[in-house]
Image: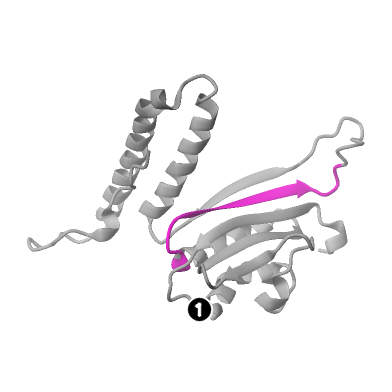
Amino acid sequence: MSRLDAPFEIHVHGQIPLRPDVDWGQIQEALKPLWKYAGAKSLEDGAHSAYDEEPGLVFDAEEHVLQMCWTVPGDQNFRQSLDELCMSLNELAATGAAVEVTFYDAEFDEEDPQNGEQSQDDFVMLFVGPNPAAIMQVQRDLLVQDMIGLMERHFEASELDGLIAEVDKLFAQRFDDLVSSLELGKPPRGSGGGSHGNNRKPRHLH
């Protein structure tokens, strides 16, 4: 596929806190689905965005955070690269994080639409994290943030505590269901088994 006739400009945006032990080689390998899709031979060559004003794919060594503000021409098969990216970032992430991916219709002229045509823009929100609890935590936080932003037009923030508590219950139940489904595939535990750190429920942040 030629960059000139790509139907979309695809923008990837997110900040991923990484584990302290993650090194440059691991980051390059994790981001391989992106830079390889862009036709580059390494992260160094493929880290640059299609737009000069965007920082691209940047590792902040001081904060140990992977920053992504990167655009590439492409089509719908880019979604396969996203699946690979998320699996790789799960292995490196220190906490849960969101990745926003926007498919901008490269052929649509907003100022001069032809024959009533509509834009084929699309938006995907992805989540990565070291474990299901971390991923659900960031999902919950974003949902609550959006919900409060909407509801505060009509109610005071103090009036929304009960609604937020119900959201927490929903995520806690989803996490319990996930743990139960995983436990079905495990052999019976011994009587001396202790607690398991990875089975913590998402924190309730108000």
Q: Nearer the viewer, residue 120 or 145?
A: 145
| Residue pictured at 66% horizontal, 75% vertical | 43
Instruction: Report the span colored magenta.
Output: 91-108
Residue 83 higher or lower than 148, as above or below: below
Residue 159 higher or lower than 36, as above or below: above
Q: Residue furthest top?
A: 154
Q: Nearer the viewer, residue 4 or 71?
A: 71
Residue 199: x percent and y percent?
27, 54
Q: Nearer the viewer, residue 12 or 179?
A: 12
Helix, strand or loop at label 1? It is loop
- Location of residue 28 by image quarter: bottom right
Count of marks, rendered view: 1
| Residue 97 lies in the magenta-colored region | yes
Residue 12: x percent and y percent?
65, 56
Tag 1: residue type? Asp
- Horizontally, is 96 left or right of 198 in the view? right
| Residue pictured at 74% horizontal, 43% vertical | 121
Residue 15 higher or lower than 59, as above or below: above
| Residue pictured at 71% horizontal, 79% vertical | 41
Mark 1 sits on what residue?
23
